[in-house]
Image (cartoon, rainbow, N blue to C red):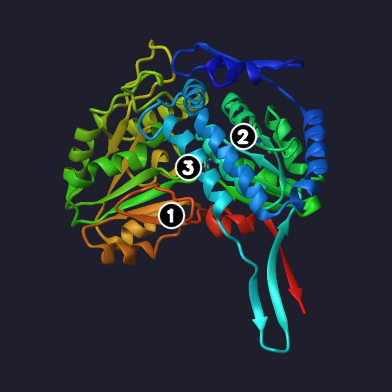
């Protein structure tokens, strides 16, 4: 096992309807996946339900040992997994991309295995004693997006399994190979039936999220789909963790050194070629440093290599699918038509193969422009000028989502004072988007609810139970 072709052969469909998956950089065929529907979802949920009591009966350290073995298996298969991810998603092997993502899968598996969740003693006053425990929920349905398909799957799978649930996962129809391959590798270390991947379209996702035997849905994707899942959860009062869309603001205070922050600003916005939920998507820069920040960012961005993922020198790749390319292209064209100034990019080569859209910086743009107000989810960053902090905070908070935000300043106390005024699940200071498996992550407003990672993440896939005596 573990060469590229053996991995693809292991997950190849054996019957039923299938779909070809093509490399978004070259158009080449990567592989073929099953397109399953309600019957496959029902069968998977039944199997996972049957396996759940036995899995839940194991002690925490036994489930942890399985997860650590799964992390070892991911480690051993890291290179073929990264190559497949690169070819299907488009992200390059290097930079904060495919190898980084597979490495994060291993890290988050180990973190879920080793995080300790003790019962909490609530009252112990000599007369009464009450403890809060977290029991397994049952079968968790995991539904994910196409931008970080492997890493986000592990975020959903690993804590769920650790807490004694079994899992049925439905990958994005845009990146099923990556998730099927990852689950195949993880399953080499797990008992049968505790983790099942079903490759299908939106209908399969809807069946999973509405299934009566699913106790909890872990969903990462768009806010629109999140709302559909909330509705379909109502009949059976399912637990939900919803990691939805974002439109993260960064606020640059006037005391920064523009050259010193340019690289971190760039990667905050352009990680995974902008296809990242908690990427910097709107940059608010004080008028005193506006021109200097624009110039420093442009100088850095123009030298970052973009191209086919398997070429080792590239660190930016194509958009994963044509729909997303069209969204980015049309938002930039609308901004240009409205009088915004394109500092860099905005000029894709229409005749070139692949969904390549160049790294694009857009200055002198109004805050109400669609490129600012909508989630572009691609390599086009609007840079908005502001005069007062009140104005910047109002603009940053002026959208109905709130996943992440950042404040950039030489004075961390000043940055923290701005941070506490921002409506987002995370605020980073002098960076944007860094995640840690022990630090909870989740959205404010319509970016969702429920936390992932660390102890809070384990609690979110457990059913709280108070034992009073
Ligand atoms: P999407 O909502 O279109 O699809 C996500 C998944 O939901 C897919 O697997 C899809 O098949 C499934 N689905 C579609 N309709 C469904 C339904 N009615 N019921 C159940 N499942 C259904 O999202 P996408 O385009 O794949 O992902 C991009 C979005 O995800 C962006 O908005 C991005 O910000 C967001 N995202 C958020 C986070 C986070 O942690 N908050 C992380 C990554 C991506």
Identify the secondary structure beneath mark 1. loop
Circle number at residue 186? 2
Secondary structure found at label 3 = loop
Q: Residues within 10 Å of mark 3 (few under 14, many from 20)?
A: many
Percent x, y of residue 377: 45, 36
Tell me the residue at 40%/47% (across/down): 433
Query: Which dot, 2 or 1, sits closer to the camera?
Result: 2
Answer few, some or many: residues within 10 Å of disc 1's Cα (few below 14, many 20 plus, some between 14 and 19). Answer: some
Q: Which x, y percent locates residue 204?
A: 73, 32
Q: Is mark 3 within 8 Å of ligand 1?
A: yes
Q: Which residue corresponds to mark 1? A: 398
Q: Earlier in the sequence, mark 2 or mark 1?
A: 2
Residue 318 seen in this snapshot: yes
- Say the numbered circle drawn on residue 328: none
> In the rendered image, which residue does mark 3 sit on?
277
Mark closer to the observer (2, 3): 2
**Going from the N terminus, do you reach mark 3 or mark 1 first?**
3
């Amino acid at each position: 096992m573990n060469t590229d072709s053996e991995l693809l052969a292991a997950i190849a469909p054996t019957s039923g309807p299938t779909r070809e998956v093509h490399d978004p950089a070259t158009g080449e065929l990567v592989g073929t996946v099953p397109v399953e529907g309600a019957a496959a979802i029902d069968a998977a949920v039944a199997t996972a339900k049957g396996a759940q009591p036995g899995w839940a009966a194991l002690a925490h350290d036994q489930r942890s040992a399985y997860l650590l073995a799964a992390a070892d298996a991911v480690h051993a298969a890291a290179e073929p997994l990264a190559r497949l991810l690169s070819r299907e998603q488009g992200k390059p092997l290097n930079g904060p991309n495919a190898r980084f993502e597979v490495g994060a899968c291993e890290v988050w598996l180990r973190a879920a295995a080793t995080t300790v969740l003790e019962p909490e003693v609530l009252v112990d006053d000599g007369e009464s004693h009450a403890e809060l425990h977290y029991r397994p929920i049952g079968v968790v349905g995991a539904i994910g997006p196409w931008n970080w398909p492997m890493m986000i799957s592990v975020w959903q799978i690993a804590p769920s399994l650790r807490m004694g649930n079994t899992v049925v996962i439905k990958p994005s129809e845009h990146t099923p190979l990556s998730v099927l391959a990852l689950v195949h590798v993880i399953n080499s270390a797990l008992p049968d039936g505790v983790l099942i991947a079903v490759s299908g379209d939106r209908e399969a996702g809807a069946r999973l999220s509405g299934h009566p035997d699913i106790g909890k849905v872990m969903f990462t994707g768009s806010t629109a789909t999140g709302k559909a899942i909330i509705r379909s959860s109502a009949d059976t009062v399912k637990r939900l963790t919803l990691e939805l869309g974002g439109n993260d603001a960064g606020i640059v205070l006037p005391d920064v050194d523009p050259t010193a922050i340019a690289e971190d600003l760039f990667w905050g916005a352009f990680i995974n070629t902008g296809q990242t939920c908690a990427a910097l998507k709107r940059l608010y820069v004080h008028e005193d440093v506006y021109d200097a920040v624009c110039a420093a960012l442009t100088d850095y961005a123009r030298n970052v290599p973009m191209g086919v993922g398997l070429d080792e020198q590239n660190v930016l790749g194509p958009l994963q699918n044509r729909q997303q390319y069209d969204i980015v292209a049309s938002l930039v064209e609308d901004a240009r038509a409205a009088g915004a100034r394109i500092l860099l990019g905005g000029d894709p080569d229409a005749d070139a193969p692949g969904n390549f859209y160049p790294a694009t910086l857009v200055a002198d743009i109004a805050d109400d422009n669609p490129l600012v107000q909508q989630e572009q989810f691609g390599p086009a960053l609007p840079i908005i000028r502001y005069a007062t902090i009140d104005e910047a905070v109002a603009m940053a908070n002026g959208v109905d989502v709130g996943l992440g935000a950042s404040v950039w300043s030489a004075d961390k106390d000043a940055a923290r004072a701005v941070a506490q005024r921002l409506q987002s699940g995370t605020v980073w200071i002098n960076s944007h988007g860094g995640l840690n498996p022990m630090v909870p992550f989740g959205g404010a407003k319509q970016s969702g609810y429920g936390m992932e990672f660390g102890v809070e993440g384990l609690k979110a896939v457990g059913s709280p139970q108070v034992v009073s005596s």
